Image (cartoon, grey):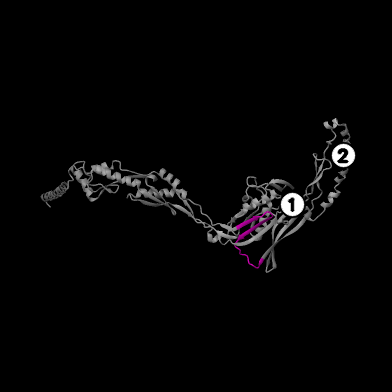
Amino acid sequence: MTKKNKKLSALFIVGCLGIIVVAGVIAFVAAGGMKDSNEIVDGVKIGGMEVGGLTEEEAEQKVGEYMDKLRNRQVTINIGEEQLETTASLLGYSCDAEDTVEKAYKLGKSGNFLSRFAAMGKIEKKDKEFPLESKVDETILRSFIEENCTKYDVKAKNSKLKLVNGKFKATNSRTGLELQLEDTITVIKGALLKDLSGDNMDVTAVVKVTKAKYTKEQVQKCKDLLGSYSTSYATSTAARATNVRVAANYINGTIIYPGKTFSVVKTIKDRTVENGYQSAAEYSSGKVVEGIGGGVCQVSTTLYNAVINAELEIVERSPHSMVVAYVDVSRDAAIAGDYKDFKFKNNTEVPVYIAATADGSTLSFRIYGEETRPENRKIKFKPEILETIQPGEPKIEEDPSKPASYRAVTQSAHVGYKANLWKIIYVDNVETERVQVNSSVYSAEPQHITVGKQTTTPTTAPSPSASANPKNTAKPKASKRPKETKRPQVTKAPKPTKKPEVTKAPQPTQKPVETEPPAE
């Protein structure tokens, strides 16, 4: 192509472009785009809302109403089955148009003709979006959730048993619900910033659901009597009888779920006056003394026998330091402080229920669960005494405040034992197995005797009234009978008292304890 032709082609192209530009300008002018209008150009949006064709004041009003709608929109928070209604602003939401309206208004109204023309061309191809500044104050949101949402937290609740008129009733179980704070903050914040429609909105809080471990259907399986036992406390003092009743009442109605361990010491609470206990006889270092809660060992002992009859797993059991009268040797279970306890475990697959009664003379425990043992299988328990330990010579204690003629047995002798307890298993009335249940050692304790050892005779010093009446001065002769009181000193020879101590049968030695059964 010649230079002349190239030049003509270039001029032709420039001419065409000029025609196109002129046509665009004519169209732009015809549309009023080039005139200084007080309206926002078409196609401009603020926060997704169309403001084209509005004046600046009209746009400010429309955007203000829109922001109010966003702030005041209703937000429903679903928390499990509960619903909490609030507003976006109370959740920390806020929005601001700042100078957005001004920027939208100035679009296409500044610069030279070509720049304005270029800007308008872009808007025609695609709407111009001015973002609305939205934010959520996490401090306000967190505070709201903590104060208003976490109150719907509930712990999972197992079904429980109630024994009403001799029949069991199982309560309904409950599903646990725990709000997850951080996750819920993230969900609500995201929803508020994303949804700019201004419509009411629903959000779902993040919760952790915990199912009840034992439902009503499972607990209802506890209906069979697994084991029971009774002892008498008819000869107890009023204080000791009170202690037995108080401790039994604390245990009554206890439910032990599978795999859980029951503790007598923890269940009957501290043995204090505030908890209902009184001072009564109990064992302490080989002596019978007064102590708050004396007698509660009969409660643990009676329960122990019901538990072994139910064949539940024994976790901890201790014998008394000396034998007690209300059960055979090796069938007792002592408790003392926090170092002696009776504990057993529910080693079945169904909850176990303990029922206790103390009617004024008889203490009884009944243990319920699901019976899985064969009907033709029976058990019984038999103590085996391995060694009998005699109490020995009486212990004499002198009391200077008592006259020389005074002599009293302050504590009966206790025979000591070493013994085992065996469980004998029968199938179809035939013995099939013997299992050792425990091994026990009981200390022997001699009889305790207190004798008087008064060194002065109260009648040796004449009283003022005696000195005033000469006739009474002859009477001190009769008070000089200490020689006669010394004659009974022959009773100090232990021969008469030793004879009863030789009794090997434990029954006589246990009688004083039976009238006042102590507990460690």
Q: Label for residue 515?
A: 1
Which residues fall within the magenta stretch? 353-377
Q: Residue at x 62, y 57 (%)?
A: 355
Left or right relative to 59: residue 477: right
Residue 362 is a magenta residue: yes
CA gap between label 1 and label 2 equals 36 Å
Residue 17 x/y as whole percent:
15, 49
Q: Residue furthest bottom?
A: 428
| Residue placed most toward the observer, 242 or 222 | 242
Left or right of residue 442: residue 485: right
Residue 322 visible in the shown view: no
- Near-viewer residue (17 or 85): 85
The image position of residue 251, as x and y in percent, is: 62, 53
Left or right position of 497 against 368: right
Helix, strand or loop for disc 2: helix
* Mark 1 vs 2: CB contact within 8 A: no
- Type of amino acid under label 1: Thr
Q: In the rendered structure, which disc, 1 or 2, sits on the residue that comes first in sequence? A: 2
Q: Assign a secondary structure to mark 1.
A: helix
From the top left corner, tell me how far across and down residue 418 is, in percent: 75, 55
Residue 343 visible to an observer of this rendering: yes
Q: Position of residue 353 (x, y in %)?
A: 60, 58
Residue holding disc 2:
482
Residue closest to the eye, 93 or 86: 86
